Image: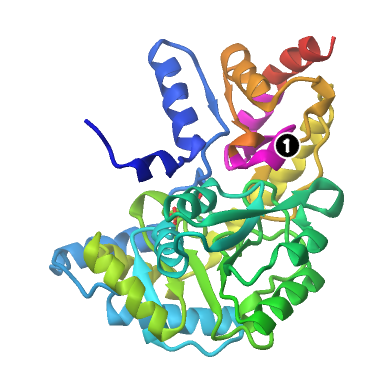
Amino acid sequence: MNVAPRMARLGTESAFEVLARARALERQGHEIIHLEIGEPDFDTPAHIKDAAKRALDAGATHYGPSAGLPELREAIARHISGTRAIPVSPDEVVVTPGAKPIMFFTIMALAGHGDEVIYPNPGFPIYESVINFVGAVPVPIPLREENGFGFDLGVFERSVSPRTKLIVINSPENPTGGVLEHAQLERIAAIAAERRIPVLTDEIYRDFLYEGAFESITAMPGLRDLTILLDGFSKSFAMTGWRLGYGVMPRDLAEHVTRLIVNSNSCTASFVQLAGIAALEGDQTPVTRMVAEFKRRRDVFVDGLNQLPGVKCVKPRGAFYAFPNITGTGRSSSEVADRLMNEAGVAALSGAAFGAHGEGYLRFSYANSEANLAKALTRMRPVFESLTR
Ligand code: PLP
């Protein structure tokens, strides 16, 4: 079939491709440790599952409003007001199946042919994919290990132009685990406010912050009516497969994004949204417990990585990814990732899958059991020894 030329501009997310390759090896009888996919290994807390079951039994099985159920939009508005210290009204909230559509719809609504969009590199691959897809020009900002994988402000300031239609930031960041410092957020906010450039702030890893307090750019001067805050339930509540996320944005943009929903998925599953209310308003101890566990695993895994020859890993401050520098092996990221999969049965991602500035790194998700993480380290050692011999 002849597909439209725009399909050539649409990228992908390599985590799903590597997962498929790992599953194929498993079908051939190999045992693979999955450190490629970014999802908590925890089960969704019981009270959230119970709420979904009750909602199903109560008949929440029909179409709902495209922007989301009013009661969930209200709960999200309260949650964001409380956690980001900004006033939020429910009509600024748009609910989607997972948070990813907020990314897609926002870029689609704000950037057109020839417009420029600034985004982090290495970064979540979908930003660049969608920027290209809509015909806009991707303007990557390198995140460098030497400055804690924060925004290179010099490059950022030189990259802003009259054609910049959107700035994308992500903190804590996938894949580096880096966190944007107050001074960096302040500078980005000042430039965005002065030039009236909207900022898409991807805060999906807000709860996974192991040092310091979370700060959202949405609360900075002049940014309240310029920000699109992306968050969701996938990571914080171990609900990746439920598909529930949201955006908080100015009302006029919310209306455009809602029309994109009408034209695509119509609405988000009603019983899933009712479970979302239970997640936001119910017991938060499962979240705290999971984050504490991830912090412990981070420490053990990063220490282990640093003992492998050719590997150097800074301790990530947030999210649940380790992003070790493997330039000591003298090999490309994709070669090392392939060898780890084939020779050690460890699935990891090449840093280059997150953009050109990710070359020389690997991404491991440490959202896996401590036993599996220890086993992965043991199995990887001979591969790194042979790579550095
Ligand atoms: N933003 C970032 C940075 C992510 O890493 C992910 C998922 O991996 C998402 C957004 C999307 O999350 P969801 O599963 O809610 O669509």
Whether residue 266 is visible to the viewer of this picture, yes or no, is no
Where residue 112 sits, quadrant-wise, is bottom left
**Image quadrant occupied by the C terminus:** top right
Q: Residue at x 42, y 27 (%)?
A: 20
Under circle 1, the secondary element is helix
Q: Position of residue 46 (x, y in %)?
A: 38, 57
Q: What is the three-letter code of the residue carrying label 1? A: Phe
Between 91 and 304, the one nearer to me in the picture: 91
Instruction: For ligand 1, tell me if the residue under mark 1 lies within 8 Å.
Output: no
Q: Position of residue 266 (x, y in %)?
A: 21, 65
Q: Residue at x 58, y 85 (%)?
A: 224
Examine the rendered structure and indicate whether residue 28 appears above or below residue 347: above
User: In the figure, is residue 288 to the left or right of 95?
Assistant: right
Examine the rendered structure and indicate whether residue 326 appears above or below residue 73: above
Q: Residue at x 62, y 83 (%)?
A: 223
Where residue 86 sits, quadrant-wise, is bottom right
Name the residue that disc number 1 marks. Answer: 301
Between 88 and 289, the one nearer to me in the picture: 88
Q: Residue at x 80, y 13 (%)?
A: 385
Examine the rendered structure and indicate whether residue 35 appears above or below residue 85: above
> In the image, which residues are magenta?
354-377
In the rendered image, residue 308 lying in the magenta stretch gets the answer: no
User: In the figure, is residue 221 to the left or right of 181?
Assistant: left
How would you rate the neighbour count of disc 1 (Cα within 10 Å): few for under 14, some for 14-19, many for 20 or more?
many
Q: Position of residue 305 (x, y in %)?
A: 77, 31
In the rendered image, residue 364 lying in the magenta stretch gets the answer: yes
